Image (cartoon, rainbow, N blue to C red):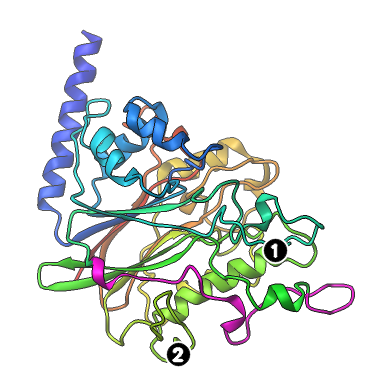
Amino acid sequence: MRNGLVVLTMLFMLSCTDQEQAMRPGLRVATFNIAMGLNKADALQVNLLSGEDINLKKVAAIIQTVRPDILLLNEFDYQGGIDSAGLFNKNYLNVSQFGGKPIDYPWTHAGHVNTGEPSGLDLDQNGKIDDAADSWGFGFFPGQYGMALFSAHPINTDSIRKFRKFRWKLMPRAKLPVDPVTGDNWYPPEIASKLRLSSKDHWDIPVSISDQVIHVVAFHPTPPVFDGAEDRNGLRNHDEIRLAADYVSADRAYYIVDDAGQSGGLEAGADFVILGDMNADPLDGDSTENPIQQFLSHAGINATCDPASEGAGLAALMQGGLNKQHLGKSSLDTSDFNDETVGNLRLDYVLPSIDLLVTGCGVFWPVAGKLGADWIDASDHRLVWADIEF
């Protein structure tokens, strides 16, 4: 009898989800760092082909429950020549997970990233040029910690802009690190002249919604840790976020050049939504100069809806540790980290342009006993979503 009750409960909740999606106006947009940065270049491909990886099944179940129209996955390894996004769509999202209703994304996009791509330079200044920190973005193989976009609406492939090769020094007032003892530039000139800013890539992906276009500005800056007193990762994180903030500001994007040689940012008045794991909390953590405020205080960004969850608040209360010292509201956390060294933080964001109406937002972090509570351990991040209307 108990099993029958569980099935009936699942069917009822899924029916409610379908009804809510059908009645939901506008567009649901989501970002999710699924932490699939695996240790071997073909590991994700093997798991995608099997259709049986338990963490990917849990990730798919979360997506099938929230049912976003546009979805960015961070830490989804990219392997050239392999349609990893298509495999995830076919073998996981198109298949019912734990009784959920399959979901399909006819349009996907992935691509090369800087993580794991050798620079041939001693970027970490340790006397060697063959370790993961000497890649343009930290990684043990090309494509590690990549990104993929999934869309229920057409992606304007010919109009995609990318900024993987944009050099950090080209940013006016770039926060390139200096030696805290000597005050000299930490990177020697031969490195500073070539150093790329984006640790993975910055994307502008136009998506057509009926007769309108929304620009998905997607990226995943480096965490502001794992460096030294020069704070090279904290400063890079700040300027990676600034690159996107400037890109959506017509009066500040003059210096930006994409990988195809086109200059400038979005046209004034263009609709956009910024997506990604920004590795920056507004009040807590190790960020340098509070970089996320470049978005949250931006006149052209609608940051009025703070995504929250009951599960985040309860987790911080039960886990304790550094969470008790945090200044931010624990209900807004989107990541679950070591409570003695980091604590839970708000790192993942869905931020539309100011002219888009946000009708709701949230974080998928159910409490114990609720649908999906046993899926969230697939990642140390949680899916964040927002409902928007033109």
> Considering the numbered disc 1 on the image, is that residue within a helix, a strand or a loop?
loop
Residue ID for mark 2: 254
> Considering the numbered disc 2 on the image, is that residue within a helix, a strand or a loop?
loop
Q: Is residue 240 one of those drawn in magenta?
A: no
Residue 88 seen by the camera: yes
Three-letter code for the amino acid on which mark 1 is drawn: Leu
Q: Is residue 79 above or below residue 121?
A: above
Q: Position of residue 235 (x, y in %)?
A: 65, 70
Residue at 39 percent across and 79 percent down: it is 248
Q: Where is residue 8 in the image (x, y as percent from the top left)?
A: 16, 21
Residue 176 seen by the camera: no
Looking at the image, residue 63 sits to the left or right of residue 55; the answer is left
Q: Nearer the viewer, residue 164 or 184?
A: 164
Looking at the image, is mark 2 or mark 1 earlier in the sequence?
1
Using a 10 Å C-alpha cutoff, classify the residue at mark 1 as few (fewer than 14 neighbours), some (14 to 19) or many (20 or more). some
Looking at the image, residue 308 sits to the left or right of residue 4; the answer is right
Residue ID for mark 1: 121
Q: Where is residue 325 in the image (x, y as percent from the top left)?
A: 67, 51
Q: Give the range drawn in magenta.
A: 157-185
